[in-house]
Structures are given as structure tokens and as C-alpha cells.
Amino acid sequence: MKLFLNISNHPSKSWDKDQKEAVNGLFMNNEVEYWDIPYPNIPPQASLEEVKSICDAVVSQVQALKGDNEVVALVQGEMTSLFFLVPSLQKLGIKVVSATTQRVAEEKDGVKTSVFKFCKFREYPIL
């Protein structure tokens, strides 16, 4: 089975057609099962050890889902936690990606509003 794990706070059911087509392109197949895993809450006052512990729980959840499946994971969230999550998932043989967007800003009556338009997925490098 082909699994796309959305580890973010942006549920896949709200994605537009372009983003869902880009997921299919990652697998060269339209039969992809989506799993939304809410990005963990990382308290701003958490120590690095606490951040790692929170991330380890997510990695364990992903490892249980992976099995023999082909898995791609979108990982987007708090910056320091990414340093734990991304390489840990890569070590499991998972391709880890980020969504790239273009910000379109409008200012009306002194209020600036930004809309983010999905462009593509970009794979995190393996360091």
C-alpha cells in the first residue's frame, strides 16, 4: 500500500486539487491512502530533551503505520522539532517532504492579508 502521512496542522481534506495531484505524482500512482497526523504541540518553554521525547512519540506512531508500505511524509511544524523528526523518519526509509508555497499579500484599508498558494513538494535532504 502507498501511504501519504500529513504531519502538519493542515488537514488534507482542505487541500486543493493541485496539492492532491502533487501527492499522486510522488507515488506515480493514484491509489494513495492519506493519514493526517496532527503536528505535536511543542511548548515554547520545552527543553530540547522534552522536544525530542515528543518527537519520538510521533516517530513511534509513524513506524507502526509504515510496516511494509511505501510511505511519503509531509512534515511541517515547529522548527527545532523538525531537526528530530525529519532525520528519524528518513532513517526508517521514509521520503520526507515539505510543501512550498507562494505568498500573495494584499493590503486593503491598512490591513495586510496573506494567502498562501501551494506550488510543489520539496524533499528534505539527507545529511
Image (cartoon, rainbow, N blue to C red):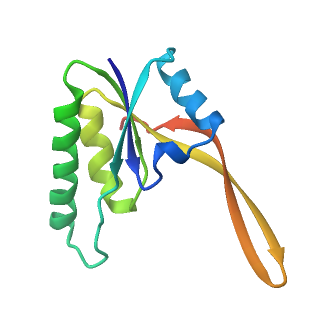
Q: Residue at x 29, y 41 (%)?
A: 87
Can you say which quadrant of the picture contains the C terminus? top left
In what quadrant of the picture does the N terminus appear? top left
Look at 30% across and 34% down and name the residue there: 90
Q: Residue furthest top?
A: 29
Q: Is 113 displayed left or right of 95 in the figure?
A: right
Counting from the top left corner in percent of width and height, residue 64 is at 16, 34
Residue 4: horizontal and vertical position, in percent? 39, 31
Is 63 situated above or below 76?
A: above
Which residue is more in the foreground, 84 or 10? 10
Near-viewer residue (4 or 42): 4
Examine the image and state in which quarter residue 9 appears: bottom left
The one of 3 and 73 positioned closer to us in this rendering? 3
| Looking at the image, residue 126 lies above or below residue 45 | above
The percent coordinates of residue 30 (x first, y second) are 51, 18
Residue found farthest to the right: 109
Which residue occupies 59% across, 37% down? 19
Query: Which residue of the protein is positioned furthest toward the bottom in this rendering?
Result: 110
Instruction: State the image coordinates of residue 97 (x, y, percent, origin top left).
Output: 45, 38
In depth, the one of 109 and 101 nearer the eye is 109
At x 59%, y 45%, the residue is: 100
Numbered circles on residues, count = 0
> In the rendered image of this protein, does residue 47 appear above or below residue 65?
below
Left or right placement of residue 16 versus residue 12 in this view: right
Work out whether 10 lies above or below 86: below
In this rendering, would 79 be left or right of 17? left
